[in-house]
Image: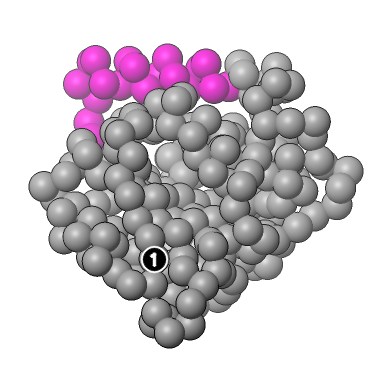
């Protein structure tokens, strides 16, 4: 869930360039009712590790710090309903939230690019995508999202779950690239409300988007890009 400098793209895909659609062969029957066993098993493994991390005093940067499953379902439903455009995740950790988004991606015949800087977490995420057979849906970029954002365009959905001191920068970078109706969802806005208050207030007052804080999990800020050009950048 962190950002940094320098990058390497798994699957040799350019960030943002196999995001909007892919072969209908990867399209699944629905989002939740036929979750493959491999994905369910990996989700359970990461949920148990996350619980253990939180209980045993594991160092902050070593912990997975992933979303709970109800937030994962919420994100998947939002992503499945987003307009056509690139799907982006900022902060992969071990790939737990990516799996939820990948379920929606398969329903939509879309794909996801996810960014992670910490090598040990990127290695866990690589293992996740290999074990679950999601390499055709998810591209992992090892590196700083903010150094790659200029390569992205026409974002339909973005999930932000990075270090809190970069939230405002990520918000500004993403909102200007959202397609009309595009969604930006930021995690931890209730659990870290005091730290994220400036960004939350910026979003609520930003004429480019309609925004609301949803009390699910640790709090999700959901922003939808307005289509009125008079309310633009």
Residue 221 visible within the image: yes
Instruction: Give the percent coordinates (x, y) of residue 11.
Output: 69, 54
Residue interval drawn in magenta: 42-60
Relative to the observer, which residue lies in front, 125 or 220? 220
Instruction: Give the percent coordinates (x, y) of residue 10.
Output: 63, 53
Residue at the spot 63% in from the left edge and 58% down from the top edge: 83
Q: Name the residue at the right extreme.
A: 25
* Residue matched to label 1: 209
Residue at the spot 28% in from the left edge and 51% down from the top edge: 163
Residue at the spot 54% in from the left edge and 22% down from the top edge: 43
Relative height, residue 19 to residue 95 (above, below): below
Relative height, residue 193 to residue 169 (above, below): above
Q: Quadrant of residue 141?
A: bottom right
In the image, taking residue 43 as reference, residue 37 lies left or right, namely: right
Instruction: Give the percent coordinates (x, y) of residue 228.
Output: 48, 77
Q: Quadrant of the C terminus?
A: bottom left
Q: Residues within 10 Å of mark 1 (few under 14, many from 20)?
A: many
For the rendered model, the colour scheme is: one colour
Residue at the spot 44% in from the left edge and 19% down from the top edge: 47
Relative to the observer, which residue lies in front, 73 or 48? 73
């Amino acid at each position: 869930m962190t950002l940094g400098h320098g990058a390497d793209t798994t699957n040799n895909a350019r960030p943002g360039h196999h995001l909007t659609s892919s072969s209908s062969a990867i399209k699944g029957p629905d989002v939740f009712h036929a979750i493959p066993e491999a994905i369910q098993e990996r989700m359970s493994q990461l949920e148990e590790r996350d619980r253990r991390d939180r209980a045993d005093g594991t160092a902050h940067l070593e912990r997975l710090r992933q979303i709970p499953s109800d937030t994962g379902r919420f994100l998947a439903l939002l992503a499945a309903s987003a307009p056509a455009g690139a799907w982006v995740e900022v902060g992969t950790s071990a790939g737990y939230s990516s799996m939820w988004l990948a379920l929606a991606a398969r329903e939509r015949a879309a794909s996801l690019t996810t960014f992670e800087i910490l090598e040990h977490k990127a290695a866990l995420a690589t293992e996740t995508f290999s074990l679950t057979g999601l390499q055709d849906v998810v591209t992992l970029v090892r590196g700083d999202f903010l150094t790659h954002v200029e390569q992205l365009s026409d974002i339909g959905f973005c999930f932000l779950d990075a270090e809190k001191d970069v939230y405002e920068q990520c918000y500004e970078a993403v909102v200007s690239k959202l397609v009309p109706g595009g969604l930006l969802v930021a995690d931890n806005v209730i659990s870290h409300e005091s730290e994220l208050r400036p960004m939350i207030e910026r979003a609520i007052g930003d004429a480019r988007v309609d925004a609301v804080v949803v009390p699910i999990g640790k709090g999700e800020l959901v922003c939808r890009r307005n289509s009125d050009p008079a309310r633009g950048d």
